[in-house]
Image (tube, rainbow, N blue to C red):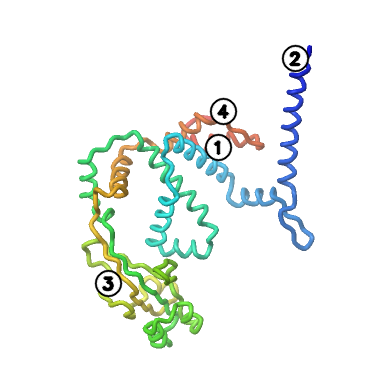
Amino acid sequence: MANIIRNILIVALIVSLATNLFMYQRFRNRRVFMSINGHNITQQDIYDYLVQDKGEIVKVILIQRILIDDAAKKKNLVPSEEEITDRMNEEKEQRWQFARQMSINSWLETEYRARYKQEIEFARLLTADIPVTEEQIQEEYKAQQPAYDTPSKAYCYLALLRNTSNQDNIKQLLEKNLSPTTIQGNYNNDVVFLGDNKLDDKANTFIFFQPFNTKQNEQIFKLKPNEVISVPPGQFAQEGFRGLLVQLLKIVPGKKADLNDKKTHEKLKLAVALKRAPNKQQFLVTLWDNAKDSFQSEEKNDRQYIERILTPDRKN
């Protein structure tokens, strides 16, 4: 009898704890998160807006991210923070639009780091069991050598001119080594400096690339440090710019890829393996099937929706 009473009390305690947790969660979602002019904004309001703005696909993205990350952890394939940072920096260097986006909206960096982490994990999971020989790595390098050799980099100040009336004055200020911030402050209506990379203590730098053993962007790479030249606006003419000034700050020479370097070797090995990797969608289907019994949601239609997106070829 005493055991029965004890068991009943234990069950009652568990139920009570679960109920309190559920009520706390509802309270937290409905508590005031922000307010203005007497109007309250709750955490639930923010959640509802995000889902309405981005769509239900947000739920699928988050579930997919968890499935991939859990699988990568089980196989010890999670990238280091340094690897993710390297990927971020590579994107910033090669795509000025991306570098500018990160500079203006710094809060986006957290999301992009999560995206790059997922991409790296997914690639490693897909190729984890695919054997690659040294001969195949050599063949991949010979076929795609420019993709693995390190290009030369010319760090520059890049001044876009809305009009050319003050071009000479701006050119002279660059030659006197005034910072882009100072120059733009003096000629705010005339010039915009493009570039959000950093070189030593210099910000607002733009990078021109020259693939190893080529003469691409030769005009820039022939400049001497601090030399300033005027070049046609090219693609920027479509955005209303009339001129372009380039000041060379520093050239970092490129080099031939070292196939014995660990990072280079792994990059080549991954590229070879990905050519024989299993179908991405089918891999996701397997991850979902292995985990879906643990899925829970307050929205009764979430399971059906997520399954429909993750398994498009299956009749749900």
Q: Amino acid at mark 2?
A: Asn
Graded by Cα atoms within 10 Å as few (under 14), some (14 to 19) or many (20 or more), the crowding at tag 4 reads: few
Q: Position of residue 282 (x, y in %)?
A: 42, 34
Graded by Cα atoms within 10 Å as few (under 14), some (14 to 19) or many (20 or more), the crowding at tag 2 reads: few
Q: Which residue is drawn at the image coordinates 40% and 79% (left, top)? A: 242
Q: Amino acid at mark 3?
A: Phe
Q: What residue is shown with label 1? A: 306
Q: What residue is shown with label 4? A: 293
Q: Position of residue 235 (x, y in %)?
A: 38, 70
**What secondary structure is found at the residue carrying circle 4?**
helix
Q: CA distance from mark 2 to mark 1?
A: 44 Å
**What secondary structure is found at the residue carrying circle 3?**
helix
Q: CA distance from mark 2 to mark 3?
A: 85 Å
Label 1 vs 3, first from the N-terminus: 3
Q: What residue is shown with label 2? A: 3
Q: CA distance from mark 1 to mark 3?
A: 52 Å
Q: Amino acid at mark 4?
A: Asp
Query: Is the C-beta separation of discs 1 and 3 under 8 Å?
Result: no
Q: What residue is shown with label 3? A: 221
Is 281 or 288 nearer to us in this picture?
288
Q: Which residue is drawn at the image coordinates 29% and 73% (left, top)? A: 220
**What secondary structure is found at the residue carrying circle 2?**
helix
Q: Is residue 113 above or below residue 230?
A: above
Graded by Cα atoms within 10 Å as few (under 14), some (14 to 19) or many (20 or more), the crowding at tag 3 reads: many
Q: CA distance from mark 1 to mark 4?
A: 13 Å
Q: CA distance from mark 2 to mark 4?
A: 33 Å
Label 1 vs 4, first from the N-terminus: 4
Q: Image quarter for residue 1?
A: top right
Query: Is the C-beta separation of discs 2 and 4 under 8 Å?
Result: no
Left or right, 150 with respect to 50, comes to: left
